[in-house]
């Protein structure tokens, strides 16, 4: 089942993005990545991932702006916000844009896999 799931990881920090890509690929998922919000929006117009992991703090187009753009043409796509700071007040800025969850960079990737499973199961039920 894992290899049927397509994931897009958006993070400007290659030291976080690349291990995350590797982790999901090792679990059997199809993974693509983007290093910026602009790149992510372009990819989303071509690819149809099942879920997006989106860094909140990026230069030029941050996670809030990127999510606003995504919602212009992808209303239902599950998006999980990635943040380095648990107390990041900007998370409240993205809540109106229907986020599916938040993953904090200090957490273990195992928690990420669990979060992914829960979100995809909920999303599948919503589509019925």
Image: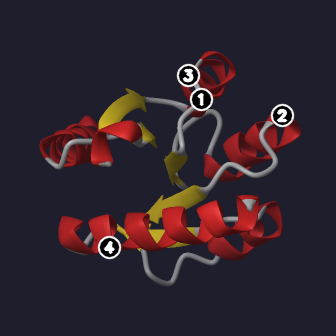
Looking at the image, tell me whether mark 2 or mark 1 is earlier in sequence order. Answer: 1
Please say if 18 is above or below 94: above
Looking at the image, tell me whether mark 1 or mark 4 is earlier in sequence order. Answer: 1
Toward the viewer: 111 or 86?
111
How far, Cα to Cα, is label 3 from label 4? 27 Å
Q: Secondary structure at mark 3?
A: helix
Name the residue beneath numbered marker 3. Answer: 39
Can residue 128 be spotted in the picture?
Answer: yes
Query: Which-is-in-front pick, marks 3 and 4?
Result: 4
Quick check: 54 left or right of 111? right
How far, Cα to Cα, is label 1 from label 4? 22 Å
Residue 75 picture location, percent across and down: 82, 48
- At 56% from the left and 22% from the top, the residue drawn is 39
* Residues under numbered marks 2 and 1 in contact, where contact means CB atoms less than 8 Å apart: no
The residue sitting at the bottom extreme is 87
Query: Which-is-in-front pick, marks 2 and 1?
Result: 1
Name the residue beneath numbered marker 2. Answer: 73
Looking at the image, tell me whether mark 3 or mark 4 is earlier in sequence order. Answer: 3
How far, Cα to Cα, is label 2 from label 1? 12 Å
- Using the rendered view, name the quadrant where residue 30 is placed: top left
Query: Which-is-in-front pick, marks 2 and 3?
Result: 2
Within 10 angstroms of label 3, few (less than 14), some, or many (20 or more) residues?
A: some
The residue sitting at the front extreme is 128
- Using the rendered view, name the quadrant where residue 128 is placed: bottom right
Within 10 angstroms of label 2, few (less than 14), some, or many (20 or more) residues?
A: few
- At 53% from the left and 48% from the top, the residue drawn is 51
Name the residue beneath numbered marker 1. Answer: 48
Quick check: 37 left or right of 108? right
């Amino acid at each position: 089942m894992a290899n049927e799931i397509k994931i897009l990881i958006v993070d400007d920090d290659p030291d976080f993005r690349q291990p995350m890509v590797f982790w999901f690929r090792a679990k059997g998922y199809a993974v693509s990545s983007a290093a910026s919000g602009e790149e992510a929006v372009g990819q989303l117009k071509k690819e149809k991932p099942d879920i997006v992991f989106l860094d909140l703090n990026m230069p030029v187009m941050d996670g809030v702006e990127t999510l606003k753009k995504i919602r212009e043409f992808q209303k239902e796509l599950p998006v999980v916000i990635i943040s380095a700071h648990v107390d990041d007040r900007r998370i409240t800025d993205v809540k109106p844009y229907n986020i599916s969850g938040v993953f904090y960079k200090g957490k273990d990737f195992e928690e990420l896999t669990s979060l992914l499973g829960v979100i995809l199961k909920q999303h599948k039920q919503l589509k019925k």
